[in-house]
Amino acid sequence: MNLLSLNKQIIGCTRCPRLRTWCETKASERRAAFAGQEYWGKPVPNFGDPNAELLIVGLAPAAHGANRTGRMFTGDRSGDWLYDALHAIGLASQPNATDASDGLTLQNVLITAVAHCAPPENKPSKDEIGNCSEYLSALLEGRDWKGILCLGAISWRETHRLLKIRPLPPFAHGAETGGRIIGCYHPSQQNTFTGRLTREMLRSQMQRLRDLAD
């Protein structure tokens, strides 16, 4: 697997017209808080350590998060939770991620997504997930990952499907497959605001992921 080449393919992808239109529209409209900022507005590439042994699979970029900053889980509340947890266990150089030039680096972990374009209502369609599956498959099959953390049921399902693991084990926070694939609630506002996912719960799963590489 050549990560640089794969990221270039992702950035130049035009397979999903609905998503490309949506990303570009959000980039031109912009949220008032970011009115003076230049939006990325393209598919968001993988981010992290090129030689990582650990993989985190999210769902998709946020319209005013990674679609704005051009870096996975950067510039939104989900990223605030994710990088705080990664920093707490020593896999991120800092606990926050504001923009692509903030100096954040990751150690031994790579972050990807089921869909690399921001979807309306954070819900990519089945076809759009299928269009993007080639990129996730390239990552999954291109390296012998010691641990894979799936954020949410969709990433859990797609990771198992592409690795041809059947039958599909039920998704749950803390679920594991083969001592390698870990399930974790997504750090979305829907989960964090309601208390379904706490910082302690997220850090616990991150620590479990790190333990797989030790």
Image (cartoon, helix red, strand yellow):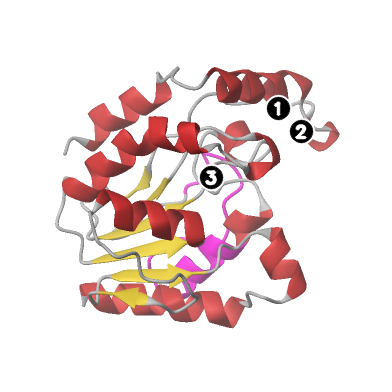
| Residue 32 seen in this snapshot | yes
Q: What residue sits right under mark 1 in the picture?
A: 37
Side of 193 relative to 51 (left or right):
right
Quadrant, the N terminus: top left
In the depicted structure, whether residue 151 falls above or below residue 100:
below
Prevalent SS, magenta region: loop
The C terminus lies in quadrant? bottom left
Cα gap from disc 3 to disc 2, whole angstroms: 16 Å
Q: Which residue sits at x=22%, y=72%?
A: 213
Q: Mark 1–mark 2 contact, CB under 8 Å? A: yes
- Which sits in the foreground, 113 or 29? 113
Marks 1,3: beta carbons within 8 A: no
Amino acid type for the residue under numbered disc 3:
Asp
Res 110 seen here? no
Q: Residue at x 55, y 80 (%)?
A: 201
Residue 102's tag is 3
Specify start and end residues of the magenta stretch as a single range.
Answer: 81-103
Q: Secondary structure at mark 2?
A: helix
The percent position of residue 189, horizontal first and vertical second, equals: 71, 60
- Label 3 CA crowd tier, 10 Å (few <14, some 14–19, many 20+): few
- Residue 34, numbered circle: 2
CA distance separating discs 1 and 2: 5 Å
Q: For residue 204, which numbered disc appears in the image?
A: none
Q: Earlier in the sequence, mark 3 or mark 2?
A: 2
Q: Amino acid at mark 1?
A: Gln
Mark pair 1, 3: CA separation: 15 Å
Q: Nearer the viewer, residue 17 or 168?
A: 168
Label 1 element class: loop
- Determine whether the residue tagged by mark 3 lies in a helix, strand or loop: loop
Q: Is residue 63 left or right of residue 32?
A: left
Residue 206 in percent (x, y) is at 42, 73
